[in-house]
Image (cartoon, rainbow, N blue to C red):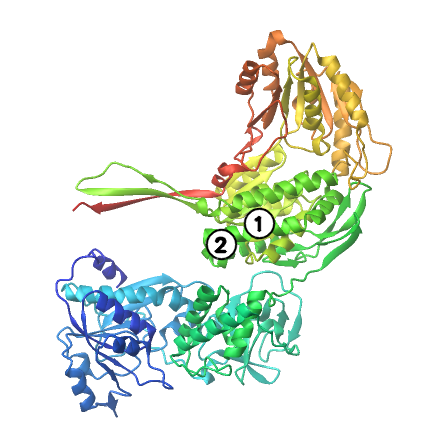
Amino acid sequence: MLSAFQSIRKFSTTKKIMSNLKIAIIGQSQFGEEVYKLLRKDGHEIVGVFTIPDVKGRADPLATAAQNDGVNVFKFPKWRVKGEPIKDVVDQYASVGAELNVLPFCSQFIPMNVIDHPKNGSIIYHPSILPRHRGASAINWTLMSGDAKGGFSIFWADDGLDTGPILLQKECVVEPDDTVDSLYNRFLYPEGIKAMGEAVRLIADGKAPRIPQTEEGATYDKIWKKKTLAEIKWDQPALTIHNFIRGNDKIPGAWATLDGQKVTLFGSSLFKGSTPSGTEVEVPGGSKPAIVHKGGMLFFGSDGQGLNVKTLQFEDGKMIPANKYGQAEEAQEALELTEEEVKMADTIKSIWVGILSNDDITNETDFFKMGAGSMDVARLVEEVKQKCNIELKNEDVYMATTLDAFVQLSVRKGRGLDEEEFTFDAVEMEVNNMTIRFPHQLFINNQFVDAKDNVTFETINPTDESVICKVSKASVDDTDLAVAAAKAAFEEGEWGKMNARDRGKLMFKLADLMEEHKEELATIESIDSGAVYTLAIKTHVGMSIDTFRYFAGWCDKIQGSTIPINHARPNRNLTYTKKEPIGVCAIVTPWNYPLMMLAWKMAACLAAGNTVVLKPAQVTPLTALKFAELVVRAGFPPGVINILPGSGSVAGQRMADHPDVRKLGFTGSTPIGKQIMKSCAVSNLKKVSLELGGKSPLVIFADCDLTVAVRQSLGAVFFNKGENCIAAGRLFVEDTIHDQFVEKVVEEIKKMKIGDPLDRSTSHGPQNHRAHFEKLMEYCEIGIKEGATLIYGGKQVDRPGLFMVPTVLTNVQDHMFVAQEESFGPIMVVSKFSSSNINEMLKSANGTEFGLASGVFTNDIRKAMYVSDKLEAGTVFVNTYNKTDVAAPFGGFKQSGFGKDLGQEALNEYLKTKTVTIEYPEF
């Protein structure tokens, strides 16, 4: 039948109607009202509307719309008695002279002499892909059956139960957490209205097909409205139970017995992640107790898998958040409203009057006892959002059913009083004249959880090598859970549906929170990585904030282009491109700038619309975890950001191997980058960007401003203790100023204060961790052994902790290890060159496999331009160094990697380009 429908689609829906029809509409509901309006708009004459009597004095929306237009409205309680048509009713119907009956959601049994009366017969809308789910509860059964696809049919009425020939059908994917309301409002309602209009146009044009239904795959499903049918059977898999609950949401509502009382469960979703801690509740017939936790109430199926429920309703009609079950209710004191809030309350009352079609609304009026249904709930939420600027959810309405309670709820939401406190197991320390507080567990799906195998590791303070705390260490299973959470957030969650501007708002809010906590973040960075506090607050944290704000501004500016292509006459073409997010992205960051490297990659990744799993370096996980806390406080949906402290060989390798990860961004060493690239290729050919090692040359000509060159060179080498990917790895100093330059450098090094990074006067802190410190000592030894001259340093500072004396090596030749390999520490490697042999010097400068950054100091613009052109590096600094900016692309050449961080180009690392070509006929 779907293939038949596809053949129908070749007829244009914009062609002029050949003849207007006289139509009788038989049905009710807002759906019927919208169909009525569309058919009138299309030029058809509505000769009569046949609907139901008013319920509690409230007219059906279809009847109200028709009466306002002066169309004949008939409100029949029934059409038949004991199966026989009521003559007076049939006669009134026949008097309108309809040429076609249109039945949008008709709940009554219509006699066949009415169905067959018009010359064009009768068409009916049904919310399933017939012949599946014939009967009155099709949407419920679509969900309860776990169908992967849903949709609707428009068919020609006959004397069977939804058995008539098909006119057209449309289908959609059923999302894992769709409810009756969401499926209806997302597809069955808006698309169904348009399809009814299309069906009538096909009939008017004489092109409407009649495709007989097959009995193959047919189901006849009973009406599903009795509460007795909706008891949950717990001896089934979690998926089956989840489908049952959502298929009953909101009527009649799936229920279970808890603590001796019947409790109805709403808002089910399949649970992914580690089992949360909370209060256990016995479930009669269940495989194990339910758990009341901060995210709701977790139930288990017979297969041990979980489903989480958000809302509970008791037999007296009272509803509560599931995470409040078993808690004594705290009486909320009524808020005294401000003048503005009083106006808002009046606006809300007027909204209720409009929806309920009743002027007699008081504070005690119950929304649902006045006949409101799920469509009214959706309308109420949207009107309050539009007119009062208050964001509510559908379940909020069910929690506050009287006008007074609803106004109080809205005011609380507007004041931010109902925001739930975010709690986690925190480490607290008194340090740097402040109390710092940070998580120490894995961050998956907006929850801090222990590793599955409960393994932890110690993170060390390099200032004195003391243990800061124990941190959960992610396993392969934990990584799989995080990827699954990120995938669900991208494909099914709020993030994937969120518009770009709202994504930007969240990122701006996160940046604001980072700024509020910048002293705490900088302190954590100092004790965990050894960064000098003053540098940490300006660069490590400051640039991280700037990066998030920069990319937040890009969210709604990512766009494709239109492209002129050759036309294939007689038709014409429109070709355009779309920039789309990739999906789940993995990020692996280094230990030298733990927070800043997170920001450089993650901000672009999020701005592009992706979700992310990030593994910070094992030796510096703490600012990433503090950042995760701020992610929740900023309001990011669950699963968008996941952070897994642990080892690269386990969690990092699993990210590279995981088939659901579509992009991996890595900053680190070249050997590990090669392994990652190989794994990404073998696993699923995932996109990769790599920012790897460097051996950045810095050329200093004799004609430069020597004072500036010395000062900038010190920063180029010793900035952040030399643990800097773009640190000047080898200085080429013109021979005529070489000795003077080295002398001045040593003088300045002796002025440096080396010590506690939290001391505001300290300029040089400890190296990051012991293994790296020992590698630096070995690096110096190799350089001296190969013939380099140790001018200064090359040893540990005489004090506890991982402090290294800033070091200067001269007389370095091209063949030496220190001339080729990166130290990643406070070691200045100096070589002489002659102004008469600049090209030979450039050959040496480019004579490594790295090409990340470079620099040149000269007052001669010709030299500056010539050297800049010849240096093989992704970044060239002229008469400055380390001057990076969030808007300037950053990345290397050769074995320093590929891909860009920062700037607009960084977005391309996290986007895919789709080309769309449309062909359309000429007039």
Pointer 2 local density, CA inside 10 Å: few below 14, some 14–19, many at least 20: some
Q: What element carries label 1?
A: strand
Q: Does any portion of residue 345 appear in the rendered image?
A: yes
Q: Residue at x 57, y 49 (%)?
A: 613
Q: Is mark 2 on a helix, strand or loop?
A: helix
Of mark 1 and mark 2, the one earlier in the sequence is 2
Q: Quadrant of residue 653?
A: top right
Amino acid type at image mark 2 = Asp
Horizontal and vertical percent position of residue 722:
71, 31
Horizontal and vertical percent position of residue 62:
29, 76
Whether 917 is drawn above or below 4: the answer is above
Q: Does any portion of residue 232 appear in the rendered image?
A: no
Q: Which residue is drawn at 60% across and 8% down?
A: 837
How many marks are shown on the rendered structure? 2
Q: Residue at x 23, y 61 (%)?
A: 4
Q: Which quarter of the figure is the N terminus placed in?
A: bottom left
Whether 667 is drawn above or below 432: the answer is above
Pointer 1 local density, CA inside 10 Å: few below 14, some 14–19, many at least 20: many
Whether 134 is drawn above or below 882: the answer is below
Amino acid type at image mark 1 = Val
Residue denoted by label 2: 502
Q: Residue at x 68, y 60 (%)?
A: 424
Residue denoted by label 1: 613
